[in-house]
Amino acid sequence: MGRLEPVEDRLWKHLKWEGECLVWQSPTNSDGYGTIGMGPGRGTEKVHRLYWILYRGPILNGLYVLHRCPRHLKTCVIHTYLGTHADNMRDASVDGTFARRSKGTRIPFDWKGRKRHGRNGKLIR
Ligand SMILES: [Zn+2]
């Protein structure tokens, strides 16, 4: 086996800008998350967590890197925020579309990037 390239280099080979999103281009795990091998014997890490650790800072104890991306549910590495497990469950339960941010603000797009309509039929801004 040849030497493995640094994980940061390998990460960027699989990331591509799609509009405002930076999206993982390679196969995902059974949960839909992109993962990357951390090196011999070091297992794998989810790419959005790795991106956070590399470029944003430590993931504090007990917090999760959660997605608030309206277009790429689990494979966009930049539209993320730190939250609790409870935040994650609440996000995932709203129509399955991540329709809320952590503080309950409605995102004006659904997961396919279409404009969302509120209950009153008006477009959400
Ligand atoms: Zn995104």
Image (cartoon, rainbow, N blue to C red):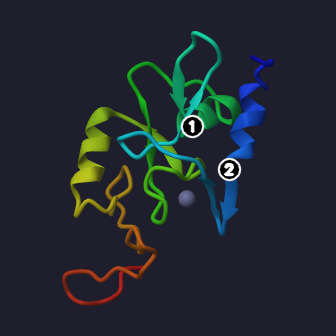
- Of all residues shown, which one is farthest toward the bottom? 121
- Of all residues shown, which one is farthest toward the top? 41
Looking at the rendered structure, the kind of residue marked 2 is Leu
Cβ–Cβ under 8 Å for marks 2 and 1: yes
At x 31%, y 42%, the residue is: 88
Is residue 29 toward the left or the right of residue 2 in the image? left
Is residue 120 toward the left or the right of residue 30 in the image? left
Is residue 21 toward the left or the right of residue 75 in the image? right
Q: Earlier in the sequence, mark 2 or mark 1?
A: 2
Mark 1, residue position: 47
- Of all residues shown, which one is farthest toward the front? 1
In the rendered image, the quadrant that contains the N terminus is: top right
Mark 2, residue position: 15
Observer-nearest of 74 and 103: 74
Looking at the rendered structure, the kind of residue marked 1 is Val
From what the image shows, is residue 32 above or below residue 94? above
In the rendered image, the quadrant that contains the C terminus is: bottom left
Quarter holding residue 9: top right
State how far apart marks 2 and 1 are (Cα).
Answer: 10 Å
From what the image shows, is residue 40 above or below residue 77? above
- Find residue 22 and name its label: none
At x 31%, y 62%, the residue is: 97
Observer-nearest of 109 and 15: 15
Observer-nearest of 85 and 114: 114
Quarter holding residue 17: bottom right
Dot 2 crowding, Cα within 10 Å, few <14, some 14–19, many 20+? some
